[in-house]
Image (cartoon, coloured by chain):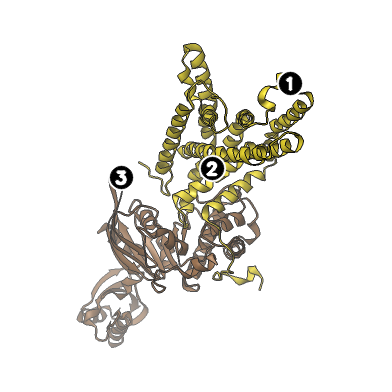
Chain colours: A yellow, B brown
Amino acid sequence: MPVYDRGYTHWEPTGGRAYPAWWVIAKRGIAEPLKKRWLLVLTLAAWIPAIIKAVMIYFKLQAGDIAELLVGNYASIDAAGFLSFMEVQRFFVFVLLAIVGAGLISTDRRDNGLSLYFSRPLGLASYIGGKAAIIMFFYAMVTLFPVYGLCLYAYNIAPDASGLELLFLIPLRATVYWLISGASISLVLLAFSSLGKRSVFVMVWWTIMVMGTETIGTIGKSLLQNDAFEALNFLGNYHNAAAGLFSSGPRLDVSPWVSLVVLLAWTFAAVLVLRKQIRPVEVVS
Amino acid sequence: MEGLVIKVNRSENGTDFGITVSNLDFAYAKDPVLKGVDFHLDKGAVGLLGPNGSGKTTLLRCLLGQVPLKSGQVSVLGWDMANRARIARTGLGWMPETGGIIPDMSGVAVVAYMGELSGMPARDAMQRAHEVLHYVGLGDERYRPCDKYSQGMKQRLKLAQALVHDPEWVFLDEPTSGLDPRGRISILELIKDLAKNKGLGVILSTHLLADVESVCQEILVLRDGVLMTQQHVDAGAREPRQVFEVEGFGNDEAFLAGLNALGAEVTRDKRLMLVTLDLTTVSGAATDSGFDTGAGVKAILGVATNTDYALRRLRRRPVTLAEEFYRMVEA
């Protein structure tokens, strides 16, 4: 009998597999933005630095030490070189995550969507986990996946490349870095998203968080001759804290441990904000 | 197999599909909203009535386990909502009064998404989404972005997402809010069909008493967070004191004397007589479930026959839910 003739029928499960709620949220949250062509173009544009690095790696292999003088360690295929690459990607991280992440919770708050989500059998952890997974996917698109691609490319064209290093250790370090930094960045961005009901305000706060803290850190260090200001640099702290993981020198003029403590504080604050803000009921005083 | 599991294990013991609330107190910060609420509901259509701010929506949120329960007990489908709310919600549908749609998605995508979040396999959820959207009358509009829907369509979409996982109970918060009369009747017909023909439990929270009268068999009335009454929707018809409208011509004095002999009180409004009769004094009126108003009609008819009074109208004056409601909340 055609669907439109059946009226209301009771659901008879077919025995298919049901996925956990966080996966359902993440799947939909990743698929919807990718339907927008301009966002897909932006995501692909984020691979341009990777293509440039690939060209530089090739150029360095052909021209040797002269090329080293011209391109610096950007063409390096050791762990530190890949950390530098992810540092360069911070502009795309900032822009793409702002576009994808700003509305993730604010839109649900604006449209009373939280009430719908929490009328289903899912808890706070599943909801936040699903939303964080969306941010982490796009974060991986501009950091982790290009690193995987470059490692594979470098292994194929560099005659003295170490397979252990390029096919295992560097991808592993990059994955660990992506997991930890991605989880922290996602929670902070989601906390901002949960504070408002309009995405545009969340974007403003995110801009202040990323660009503002970097600017204050740089100006504070230059004018007041105090390196401690660099600890304010939000995204810079992630690269600085990861220096040890990538066998690199510090990226800021503060200890990586200081950066780590600052980031832990931000992440902890974000968790507190999320626990307070995400409720199925809006309490109006 | 998980879809099968969530469908089968909805009631904790497999037999309890009711709702029991015991001594429930709830407060937002320090503002008490519900005070000592107690009731039990078996599956059916229940109207939740009360003035603004009486705690109707909060009570529904307690039944959904959306707010932390600190005092009292709420059991839905046999599950204790203080700590097993997530399991219980596999068998509950919720239609919020405001918002409750997810923009940038088509109607069918929203409903399927909600089905998947309820634990349905993706394929089942999509198939059910098509079915329930046809059922609520959005079959032709299901591929349109839902933020472009009219108010009536949004209400139907919200009803569809509440039904997609085939819940045991649906909680509807002001489902006819903002609808034109035609849309309102249409939504009420759907709700009535769900409750009467499809075996779903429905709690209908609304300000519109006529909506409750047309759909529900039972009502809960809240005032200032206190449950004033839980009763059958036409409980007034079972009360011992009934008012009958009588109109006719003949010997008025003899007819009135006959009514007085029955113990009736009579007031006149031009030609219309309002006869208040205590059915406890009428033989054969008392039944197991209340009082038979037919016996009162027969008694008045007997007086009219004996006094040669020609009746043009004789009927029990319908006690509307509105009259009952205002009597309760203003008491």
Chain letter of disc 2? A
Find disc 1 in the rendering and name its residue: A65
- Which residue is at a point 46% across and 12% down the rendered structure image? A224
Residue A170 in the image: x percent, y percent?
A: 62, 37
Vertical comparison of A49 with B292: above or below = above
- Which residue is at a point 58% across and 58% down the rendered structure image? B112
Whether labels 1 and 2 belong to a single chain: the reply is yes
In this view, the residue in front, B41 or A157, is: A157
**Callout 1 touching callout 3 (CB < 8 Å):** no
Find disc 3 in the rendering and name its residue: B29
Find disc 2 in the rendering and name its residue: A104
Residue A20 in the image: x percent, y percent?
A: 53, 56
Residue A272 in the image: x percent, y percent?
A: 40, 39
Mark 2 neighbour class, 10 Å CA radius: few under 14, some 14 to 19, many 20 or more: many
Q: Nearer the viewer, mark 1 or mark 2?
A: 1
Q: Amino acid at mark 1?
A: Asp
